[in-house]
Image (tube, rainbow, N blue to C red):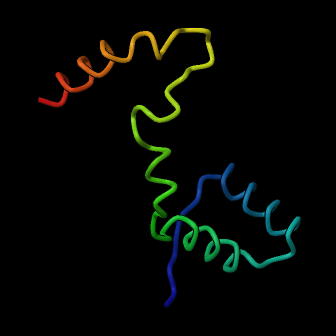
Amino acid sequence: MTLTVRLPDKLEQQLAEYCTTYRVTRSEAVKRALQDLLKPETPDQSRVDHPFIGCDKGDGSDVSGNIKRLLRERFRKNR
């Protein structure tokens, strides 16, 4: 199948650099990108997207001390 896509200049330049670096054609690079984009989500990836897993912002705030409040706020938003 043939697909024609218009790319912004900056993206076209990045694609050209990628192809030169990895010695692949533009078609092969686009196929790789699409395969990566469209591959099914694994269970590990879905855990990362969960709103409370890894929610420590690293700014010193005490997430564990506020978990009940955070849960109440989260579930009130979903109603």
Relative to 20, 45 lies left or right: left
78 or 61, which is in the foreground?
61
Q: Quadrant of residue 61?
A: top right
Q: Which residue lies furthest to the left in this view?
A: 79
3 or 61, which is in the foreground?
61
Residue 64 sits above or below residue 18 on the image: above
* Rendering coords of residue 49 (x, y %): 44, 44
What's the residue at 47%, 16% (across, down)? 64
Relative to 6, 14 lies left or right: right
* Rendering coords of residue 52 (x, y %): 41, 31
* Rendering coords of residue 44 (x, y %): 51, 56
What's the residue at 21%, 26% (across, down)? 75
Quarter containing the C terminus: top left
What's the residue at 54%, 63% (across, down)? 6
Relative to 64, 20 lies left or right: right
Q: Quadrant of residue 30?
A: bottom right
Residue 25 sits above or below residue 1 on the image: above
What's the residue at 44%, 52% (across, down)? 46
* Rendering coords of residue 27 (x, y %): 66, 79
How many numbered discs? 0
